[in-house]
Amino acid sequence: MASGGDGAEASGGRRVLVVGGGIAGLGAAQRLCSHPAAQHLRVLEATACAGGRIRSERRFGGVVEVGAHWIHGPSQGNPVFQLAAEYGLLGEKELSKENQLVETGGHVGLPSVCCTSSGARVSLELVAEMASLFYGLIDQTREFLHATETPVPSVGEYLKKEISQQVTGWTENEETRKLKLAILNTFFHVECCLSGTHSMDLVALAPFGEYTVLPGLDCTFSGGYQELTNCIMASLPKDVMIFNMPVKTIHWNGSFREGTFPGEAFPVLVECEDGSRLPAHHVIVTVPLGFLKEQQNTFFDPPLPAEKAEAIRKIGFGTNNKIFLEFEEPFWEPDCQLIQVVWEDTSPLQDTAPSMQDAWFKKLIGFLVLPPFGYVCVLSALREAGPFIRSVCLRKQHVGLTASHF
Ligand SMILES: Cc1cc2nc3c(=O)[nH]c(=O)nc-3n(C[C@H](O)[C@H](O)[C@H](O)COP(=O)(O)OP(=O)(O)OC[C@H]3O[C@@H](n4cnc5c(N)ncnc54)[C@H](O)[C@@H]3O)c2cc1C
Ligand SMILES: *[C@@H]1O[C@H](CO)[C@@H](O)[C@H](O)[C@H]1NC(C)=O
């Protein structure tokens, strides 16, 4: 963040502090460790463990991902993939050339089964037809990247405008037309999950194409995603990680002196909740956006430049929930991977947002079948939540719920 005095060389290198021990902070620390100038490196992590939003737990007799689940676009250009491969955390199929070459365009694959909310099976042909319509439109939205003007401000409005035009040409009976809209509604929710938003109306159209989709069929870690952050952490010198050390304020425009380094002035002073004050030449901040939104006024002293503060205020995010359901016996076919759910009588063209308290489950997009854990079978339901719902209680036993911010 800042750099100062010449005394650094005399006392043997620069003091660098990394705030946050998620994958971003660990990645930065790993890079710096191999740099001769960064001899005094510490990662200050608020909690008792590293990994942040990557957290794998042993539950139901297997490993479940409380946070991140997939490597999206696992191929050579993806640093997460490269690290995972280097540490030997991926299987043969995930490492294969064929897997790395698959071009998904960032679109989620078709489900194995699709059911309506009243339990009826939906024909997979109809789902495929709607998927091709929806993803065709998503591809179109990316074309506005270099346009000087967009027809509407958001991806959601664009999709709805195009869909309402298509609907006028649909010749099927009323029932099928309603079902097609309900299927499209599920695809809207899938896209919300991917974009980490509760409405595609909040995602700007013009820059949507900035997101680069890497080739490769999304893959998972059989031993849990957290093996990756554990491996990165194990590669760091022993005393680098400092746990249970929440940072309170970063004083970044000063000249701080400390008894242990006589004659040296540091441009940054990191003040922790427990009262510790750690001087540094450089600080790398990797705390989540939500934390910055809430704390930026007191977290930086002096405050960040207006431009940066405004960016923090303007960038948004949503909440993604996962619900794990445990069954003694599977009710699904052995080769089933994704059970998609279509909520009857929903439509992306309906503006009336149902009351969240009554209809929170209508944001469930489906159930992912986890590999069998010995004697139990687990489905992981994915939903994107509205801005008001932070946690949900379910009465059913054996239901684990996580609510985490992207
Ligand atoms: C439910 C869920 C599912 C996801 N699925 C996927 C997926 O399938 N694929 C994918 O690629 N990504 C996925 N993501 C996103 C991915 O997990 C994150 O992008 C990534 O883990 C963020 O890493 P980070 O290091 O930037 O932040 P974090 O992991 O949030 O790390 C920040 C760290 O900073 C610490 N911290 C906060 N405040 C302070 C403070 N004041 N002082 C010190 N330390 C502090 C926190 O404790 C935390 O350890 C998912 C996220 C969630 C929540
Ligand atoms: C940083 O400190 C210098 C010198 O005291 C001052 O001129 C400058 O305005 C400060 N910058 C900020 C952002 O406070």
Image (cartoon, rainbow, N blue to C red):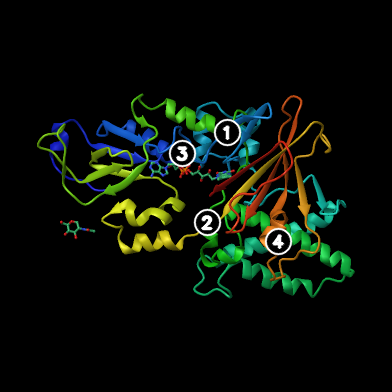
Name the amino acid, label 4: Phe
Q: State the SS at label 2.
A: loop
Name the amino acid, label 3: Ile
Classify 115 as above or below 149.
above
Residue 346 appears left or right of 256: right
Q: Is mark 3 within 8 Å of ligand 1?
A: yes
Q: State the SS at label 3.
A: helix
Q: Which residue is mark 1?
A: 56
The residues bearing labels 3 and 2 have C-alpha atoms spaced at a distance of 19 Å
The residues bearing labels 1 and 3 have C-alpha atoms spaced at a distance of 14 Å
Q: Which residue is mark 4?
A: 134
Query: Residue 353: image x %, image y %?
Result: 68, 67
Q: Which numbered marker is on residue 33?
A: none
**Image quarter where ligand 2 lies:** bottom left
- Measuring 75% from the left and 40% from the top, which residue is drawn there? 337
Dots 1, 2 in contact, CB < 8 A: no
The residues bearing labels 1 and 2 have C-alpha atoms spaced at a distance of 23 Å
Classify 168 as above or below 20.
below
Q: State the SS at label 1.
A: strand
The residues bearing labels 3 and 4 have C-alpha atoms spaced at a distance of 33 Å
Q: Which residue is mark 3?
A: 23
Mark 1 or mark 2: name the one nearer the start of the chain. Answer: 1
Closest to the observer, 333 or 350: 350
Q: Which residue is mark 2?
A: 317
The residues bearing labels 4 and 1 have C-alpha atoms spaced at a distance of 33 Å
